[in-house]
Image (cartoon, rainbow, N blue to C red):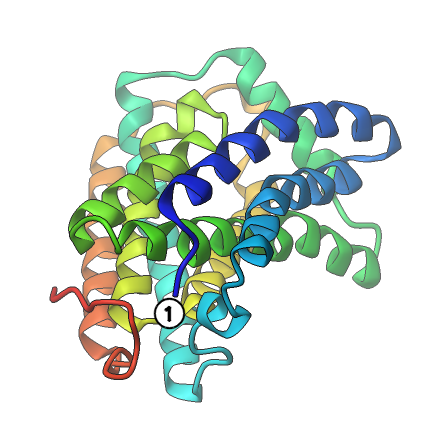
């Protein structure tokens, strides 16, 4: 049982319209609060759609929690996707340099989230990694993707959901990155039949990005020179490692309504 496709897609549109408005209103109260509220507003229409459709939450959450082996593989998947995504962004950087304003906004975000201590670090990781992973996966891979699978083939459903995943980030420069990531996470969802798998891999990728960014970025040095060979190597390594993880994943879909994609 799934949310009707039109209702699922409509909930994304409503959340997408409301998210920037809430973010602007919440920003004066702190970046972390704004991030959390924007994610909650994005997923709220989808949650209401689930409740209004009478779909049981066990069907949405799908295989929650994970067994230990799959959880470890998802930690590896998050790390491999992080490596591959950095490679993809590095390759994009060789042909498309982001504007100074874009880079400055990115730096301000990380500066606002810079923790003052261990507890503050937990709050920042929750705001930039855990909450976005949970809300975005619940909406895109928990609600939208299963609904699309009722009206189209798994490959098409994964592609459409990946496009929506890219759109909800409202970031033209990272569109290719979020599209490819959405394809990978959709494949994980269909492959494992588990929403928790996507949430864990997504959270690991976000957390690694947040943890490494302050060490990799030095505003005083200006823009670095493009490194296409490094980008190509990282993309190849991340893609290969992700493919290995997919091969090692146990099939959890034998009793699931989610079809399984072969890789």
**Rendered location of residue 136, percent (x, y):** 52, 49
- Position of 250 with respect to 144 (left or right) is left
**Residue farthest toward the bottom in the current orientation of the protein:** 68
The image quadrant where one finds the C terminus is: bottom left
Residue 153 picture location, percent across and down: 16, 52
The quarter of the picture where residue 141 lies is: bottom left
Query: Would residue 161 be visible to someone looking at this image?
Result: yes
**Which quadrant of the rendered structure holds the N terminus?**
bottom left
Query: 137 above or below 105?
Result: below
- Which of 218 and 154 lies nearest the eye of the viewer? 154
Structural crowding at the residue carrying mark 1, measured as other residues with C-alpha within 10 Å and reported as few (<14), some (14–19) or many (≥20): many
Q: Is residue 246 left or right of residue 221?
A: left
Q: Position of residue 189 (x, y in %)?
A: 33, 63
Q: Which residue is mark 1?
A: 76
Q: Residue at x 73, y 41 (%)?
A: 37
Taking the image as shown, residue 247 lies to the left or right of residue 22, namely left
Q: Residue furthest right?
A: 29
Q: Is residue 87 visible?
A: no
Q: Residue extending furthest left?
A: 262
The residue lying at 75 percent from left, 36 percent from top is 34
Height in image: 32 above or below 66? Answer: above
**For residue 50, what is the image quadrant?**
bottom right
Between 184 and 137, the one lying in front of the other is 137
Question: Looking at the image, which residue is at 42% across and 21% down?
Answer: 172
Instruction: Name the residue rendered at 22%, 54% in the picture.
Output: 239
Q: Position of residue 106 (x, y in %)?
A: 59, 28
Image quadrant in which you'd find residue 15: top right
Q: Secondary structure at mark 1?
A: helix
């Amino acid at each position: 049982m799934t949310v009707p496709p039109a209702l699922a897609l409509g909930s994304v549109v409503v959340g997408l319209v409301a998210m920037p408005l809430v973010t602007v209103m919440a920003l004066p109260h702190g970046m972390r609060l704004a991030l959390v509220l924007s994610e909650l507003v994005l997923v709220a229409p989808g949650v209401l759609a689930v409740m209004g459709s009478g779909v049981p939450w066990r069907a949405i959450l799908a295989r929650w929690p994970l067994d230990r082996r799959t959880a470890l593989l998802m930690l590896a998947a998050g790390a491999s996707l992080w490596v591959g995504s950095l490679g993809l962004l590095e390759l994009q950087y060789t042909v498309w340099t982001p504007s100074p304003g874009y880079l400055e906004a990115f730096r301000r975000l990380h500066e606002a989230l810079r923790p003052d201590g261990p507890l503050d670090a937990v709050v920042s990781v929750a705001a930039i990694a855990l909450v976005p992973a949970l809300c975005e996966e619940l909406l895109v891979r928990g609600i939208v993707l299963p609904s699309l699978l009722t009206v189209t083939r798994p490959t098409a459903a994964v592609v459409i959901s990946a496009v929506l995943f890219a759109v909800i980030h409202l970031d033209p420069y990272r569109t290719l990155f979020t599209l490819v990531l959405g394809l990978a996470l959709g494949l994980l969802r269909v492959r494992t039949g588990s929403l928790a798998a996507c949430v864990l891999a997504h959270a690991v990728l976000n957390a690694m990005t947040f943890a490494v960014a302050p060490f990799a970025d030095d505003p005083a040095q200006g823009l670095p020179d493009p490194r296409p060979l490094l980008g190509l190597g990282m993309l190849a390594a991340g893609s290969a490692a992700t493919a290995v993880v997919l091969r090692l994943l146990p099939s959890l879909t034998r009793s699931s309504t989610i079809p399984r994609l072969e890789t």
